[in-house]
């Protein structure tokens, strides 16, 4: 299980913002935690999946995509801030996220 | 080693980038001139193009529009001396790939689309069939759902290892998509078509489409087209006719097709069509290549 430190949220936020800035071909300053992933950034499920892969690699996470899918159905995210929070839970709880 | 370029062609327009028409205008191309040529050859009254014209959401019109924009983009790229080493068309993108290969004229492509549409229309009109897409489940997961729930469905295309397309009875498509969400799919939704393209339900049309092709003017391809059916290089007239039938009636595999292009040392790919669907599904297709929209030439 990955070690969560005081800096982890900041690190996750930076990765998420950089990822969307590159994917959407916009400046990172144009994205905030309030940005709506679909209406503001034209995000999609494959983008979300790619981001999960980035975090799986970075934090050596042991979590199945299906588990994240099941969690996401019950806890849908709309904004970048909510997405960052979900990524934090994934990093912290991995496959146990469904027990929350 | 010289880097190779490929043109790849989408089947449908899921969503416009809304840069399409500006790009054509900058290059002195009027999409309505192309649409008028199709209206004349098919004796149809196609409406004037606008992004929000609902008439272009009708199945035949949307296929024609996707083909038309792909051909117009191809003409612009060729006029700028960007020449591909390979071509590949996603599903009905095959018609634009044949146009780019100079195997068929623009008008012949329209006739092929119309004929294929007309042939399968008896299935379409029953409203019994449909297609869907799942993201986040493996082929094994989806096949298990199909089998465990005794659904009359097939995986008819693999976009990438996480993105699958299914076709069959509409009712079963809807059941599968609901079950897929419960199973943990990140996304599962119906496609806006009433025809189970590439499924076993289309096999009955092989012979009649083959017969139709006997009287169609087709030339040898000047650029190899990678088959989405079995990833062979298609060049000869006979092979083109075979591929056209396979493309309508058999399962395809876009993932393997992209891998074949990468294996052929293609490093630059242009998505020759409206929207950016092919770019989106390429996310999980690994390789040393760059896939870009035509606007970025």
Image (cartoon, coloured by chain):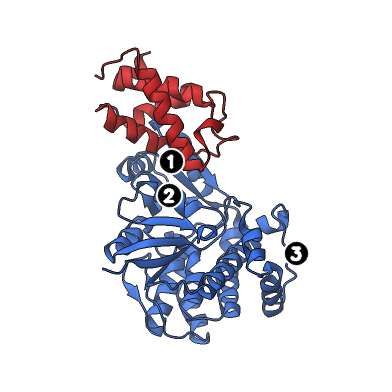
Identify whether B222 is placed above or below B31: below
Both marks 3 and 1 on one chain: no
Q: Please tell me which residue is depicted at 39% across the width and 39% down the height of the picture.
A: B149
In whole angstroms, how far apart are the C-alphas of marks 1 and 2? 7 Å
- The quarter of the rendered structure image containing the N terminus of chain B is bottom left
Chain ID at mark 2: B
The residue labelled by disc 1 is A46
* Chain letter for the red part: A
Q: Position of residue B15 (x, y in %)?
A: 59, 50
Instruction: Residue at 50% x, 33% y: name it.
Output: A28
Q: Which residue is painted at 40% across and 64% down in the image?
A: B250
Label 3: chain letter: B
Where B225 sits versus A40, above or below?
below
| Res. B153 visible in picture | no
Which residue is identified by label 2?
Answer: B281
Locate residue B268, reporting x and y percent: 39, 61
Chain drawn blue in the picture: B
Question: Contact (CB < 8 A) between labels 1 and 2?
Answer: yes
In percent of width and height, residue B207 lies at 45, 76
In terms of depth relative to the viewer, which is nearer, B13 or B267? B267
Using the rendered view, name the quadrant where residue A93 is placed: top left
């Amino acid at each position: 299980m990955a070690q969560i430190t005081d800096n982890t949220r900041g690190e996750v936020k930076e990765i998420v913002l950089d990822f969307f800035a590159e994917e959407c071909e916009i400046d990172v300053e144009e994205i905030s935690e309030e940005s709506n992933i679909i209406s503001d950034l034209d995000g999609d499920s494959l983008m979300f999946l790619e981001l999960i892969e980035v975090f799986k690699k970075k934090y050596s996470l042991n979590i199945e995509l299906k588990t994240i899918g099941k969690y996401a159905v019950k806890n849908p995210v709309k904004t970048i801030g909510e997405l960052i929070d979900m990524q934090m839970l994934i990093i912290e709880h991995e496959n146990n996220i469904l027990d929350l | 080693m010289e880097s190779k370029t490929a043109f790849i062609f989408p089947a449908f327009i899921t969503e416009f980038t809304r840069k399409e028409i500006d790009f054509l205008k900058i290059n002195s191309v009027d999409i309505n001139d192309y649409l008028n040529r199709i209206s004349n050859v098919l004796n149809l009254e196609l409406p004037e193009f606008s992004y929000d014209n609902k008439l272009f959401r009708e199945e035949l019109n949307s296929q024609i529009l996707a083909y038309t924009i792909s051909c117009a983009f191809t003409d612009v790229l060729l006029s700028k001396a960007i020449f591909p080493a390979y071509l590949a068309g996603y599903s009905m993108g095959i018609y634009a790939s044949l146009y780019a290969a100079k195997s068929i004229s623009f008008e012949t492509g329209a006739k092929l689309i119309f004929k294929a549409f007309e042939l399968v229309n008896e299935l379409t009109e029953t409203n019994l069939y449909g297609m869907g897409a799942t993201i986040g489940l493996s082929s094994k997961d989806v096949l298990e759902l199909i089998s465990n729930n005794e659904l009359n469905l097939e995986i008819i295309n693999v976009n990438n290892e996480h993105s699958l397309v299914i076709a069959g009875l509409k009712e079963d498509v809807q059941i599968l998509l609901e079950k897929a969400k419960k199973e943990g799919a990140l996304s599962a939704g119906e496609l806006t078509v009433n025809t189970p393209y590439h499924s076993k339900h289309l096999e009955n049309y092989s012979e009649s489409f083959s017969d139709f092709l006997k009287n169609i003017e087709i030339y040898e391809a000047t650029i190899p087209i990678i088959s989405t059916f079995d990833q062979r290089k298609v060049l000869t007239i006979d092979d083109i006719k075979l591929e056209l039938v396979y493309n309508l009636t058999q399962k395809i595999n876009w993932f393997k097709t992209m891998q074949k292009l990468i294996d052929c040392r293609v490093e630059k790919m242009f998505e020759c069509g409206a929207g950016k669907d092919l770019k989106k599904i390429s996310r999980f297709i690994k390789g040393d290549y760059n896939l870009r929209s035509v606007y970025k030439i």
